Image: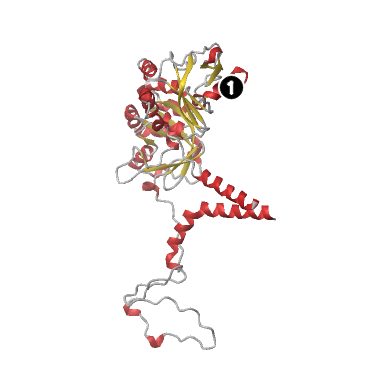
C-alpha cells in the first residue's frame, strides 16, 4: 500500500509540473486601471517580454500619476532604463519585505543584465524601515531610499509578485544623462567597435547602411555577424554574388521592428526582415532555451551572442554566424521519408503481369500472410489497423504521448524500487 501511495503522489506531482504556465504581466495588470500607463510602457519598451520570459521575478509598479511624471520628462530609451530598475530578479511579497535578514538587502534588477549599468547601478537596496515601512533605492554609493512600498497588487507564489511603490528608483545620472537620439546613433561605428568590421564594411560599400538608417525611426533590429563569422567554413564567397544578392543578404540581417533579446525569447511567429517581399520570403524564425536565443534561416542557424546597442527604437545584436537565406543559398536538405516495406509502385496497365506469370508459392514452405490486395485502379486496399499505412498516425501518437510515457516509465522504476 505504501508503494501505491508513493506512486500516486509521484504521478500527481508530475502532472502538476507539466501544467505550469508562464505568467503574462500585462494581463495581470489589466484589471487594475491605476497601472494602465505603466503596463503600456512595459509593452512599448518590450520589457513585458523580458518579464514574461523569467520564472521568479518581482515587478515594482508605478501608478498612473507617478508614471506620467516620469514619461513627461524623458525619452523612451531613458524610460526603459528606469523601468528596468523596477524589475527585481527575486520574489518579494509583503510578508518577505518585512522579514528581510538584518533589515536590509541588495537585489539584482533587469537593468543589471543589460550590461549598461556599471558597478552597483543595476542593483536596488531594499530596507525594512521603522513603523512598518519599506524603502527602495539604488545600491550605488550615495543613493537615498527615494521610494517606499505602498501596497500589494498581485502575487503568484513563488513565481511573480507585483507591488506598488511610490516613485521611480533613481540611480545616479540615470535620468539626467542625455539620451542618444535613435537617428543619431552611428551604426557603423558601433559595429566596428563591437568587432563586426567586415559586416560594417559591406553595409557601407553596398549602400545598405542608408536603408538601415532610414528604417531606424520606425524601429530596427540588426543581427550583426562578428568578423570570425565571415571566416567560418561553409560561408559562400560573397564576391561571386551579384550586387542585388549582396543587398538582399545584408537586408536579411535586419528586421523593421524594435526586438531586443527579451522580445525574441517569446517570439513564435516568423520574423520579417528588410529583405522580405511577401509570401514568406526572406523570413527568420527564433527559438529559445533559457536565456539563449537561436535564429534559424532554413539553411543555417546562429546563436544571438550579445547586445551591442539597445536604444529604443534601435537595437543591434551580435550573432555567431552569417545568416544565409534559403532564397539565395537553397534550403537545408530534409531527411528522406522512410520507405514502407509493404509499399511498392503501382504497376501501370501496360506492365501489369498476367496471372499466369505470377510465381506460385512453394508447397514445401509455410506461406506468409498474404500482402494487402490491390484495387483494380492500382490503389492499395484499406489497410488493417496497425499496418504500415498508418505510420503517420503512429508517429503523431508517439509525439503526443512522449511525456506520458516518460512519467509511466519513471513511475514503474519508482514502484520497482519501493517494492524491491
Residue 99 horizontal/vertical position (percent)? 58, 22
The residue depicted at 35 percent of the width and 72 percent of the height is 379
The residue depicted at 43 percent of the width and 65 percent of the height is 390
Is 165 on the left-hand or right-hand side of 8?
left
Compared to residue 210, the image places residue 62 above or below, namely above
Furthest residue in direction front, as rendered: 1
Viewer can see residue 261: no
Residue under numbered circle 1: 99
| Quadrant position of the C terminus in the picture | bottom right
Q: Quadrant of residue 191?
A: top left
Furthest residue in direction left, as rendered: 278
Viewer can see residue 228: yes
Residue 5 horizontal/vertical position (percent)? 61, 50
Q: Residues within 10 Å of mark 1 (few under 14, many from 20)?
A: few
Is 407 on the left-hand or right-hand side of 299?
right
Furthest residue in direction right, as rendered: 420
Residue 315 horizontal/vertical position (percent)? 41, 29
Compared to residue 39, the image places residue 303 above or below, namely below
Residue 231 horizontal/vertical position (percent)? 50, 40
Compared to residue 161, the image places residue 381 above or below, namely below
Amino acid at each position: 500500500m505504501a508503494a501505491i501511495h508513493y506512486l500516486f503522489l509521484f504521478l500527481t506531482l508530475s502532472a502538476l509540473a507539466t501544467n505550469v504556465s508562464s505568467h503574462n504581466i500585462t494581463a495581470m495588470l489589466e484589471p487594475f486601471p491605476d497601472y494602465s500607463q505603466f503596463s503600456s510602457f512595459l509593452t512599448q519598451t518590450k520589457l513585458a517580454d523580458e518579464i514574461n520570459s523569467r520564472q521568479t521575478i518581482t515587478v515594482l509598479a508605478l501608478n498612473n500619476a507617478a508614471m506620467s511624471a516620469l514619461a513627461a520628462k524623458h525619452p523612451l530609451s531613458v524610460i526603459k532604463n528606469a523601468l528596468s530598475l523596477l524589475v527585481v530578479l527575486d520574489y518579494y511579497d509583503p510578508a518577505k519585505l518585512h522579514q528581510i535578514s538584518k533589515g536590509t538587502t541588495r537585489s539584482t534588477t533587469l537593468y543589471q543584465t543589460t550590461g549598461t549599468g556599471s558597478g552597483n547601478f543595476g542593483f536596488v537596496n531594499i530596507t525594512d524601515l521603522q513603523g512598518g515601512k519599506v524603502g527602495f533605492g539604488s545600491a550605488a554609493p550615495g543613493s537615498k531610499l527615494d521610494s517606499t512600498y505602498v501596497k500589494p497588487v498581485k502575487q503568484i507564489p513563488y513565481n511573480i509578485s507585483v507591488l506598488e511603490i511610490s516613485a521611480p528608483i533613481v540611480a545616479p545620472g540615470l535620468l539626467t544623462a542625455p539620451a542618444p537620439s535613435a537617428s543619431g546613433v552611428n551604426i557603423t561605428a558601433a559595429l566596428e567597435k563591437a568587432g563586426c568590421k567586415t559586416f560594417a564594411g559591406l553595409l557601407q560599400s553596398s549602400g545598405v547602411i542608408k536603408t538601415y538608417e532610414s528604417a531606424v525611426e520606425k524601429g530596427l533590429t540588426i543581427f550583426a555577424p562578428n568578423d570570425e563569422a565571415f571566416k567560418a567554413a561553409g560561408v559562400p564567397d560573397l564576391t561571386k554574388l551579384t550586387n542585388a544578392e549582396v543587398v538582399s543578404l545584408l537586408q536579411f540581417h535586419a528586421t523593421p521592428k524594435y526586438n531586443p533579446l527579451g522580445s525574441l525569447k517569446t517570439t513564435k511567429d516568423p520574423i520579417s526582415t528588410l529583405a522580405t517581399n511577401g509570401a514568406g520570403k526572406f523570413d527568420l524564425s527564433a527559438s529559445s532555451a533559457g536565456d539563449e536565443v537561436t535564429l534559424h534561416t532554413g539553411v543555417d542557424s546562429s546563436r544571438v551572442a550579445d547586445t551591442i546597442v539597445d536604444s529604443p527604437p534601435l537595437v543591434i545584436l551580435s550573432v555567431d554566424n552569417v545568416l544565409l537565406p534559403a532564397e539565395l543559398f537553397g534550403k537545408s536538405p530534409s531527411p528522406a521519408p522512410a520507405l514502407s516495406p509493404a509499399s511498392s509502385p503501382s504497376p501501370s496497365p501496360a506492365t501489369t503481369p498476367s496471372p499466369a506469370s505470377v510465381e506460385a508459392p512453394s508447397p514445401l514452405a509455410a506461406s506468409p500472410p498474404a500482402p494487402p490486395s490491390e484495387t483494380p485502379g492500382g490503389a492499395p486496399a484499406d489497410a488493417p489497423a496497425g499496418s504500415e499505412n498508418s505510420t503517420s498516425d503512429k508517429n503523431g501518437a508517439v509525439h503526443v504521448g512522449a511525456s506520458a510515457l516518460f512519467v509511466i516509465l519513471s513511475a514503474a522504476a519508482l514502484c520497482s524500487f519501493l517494492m524491491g
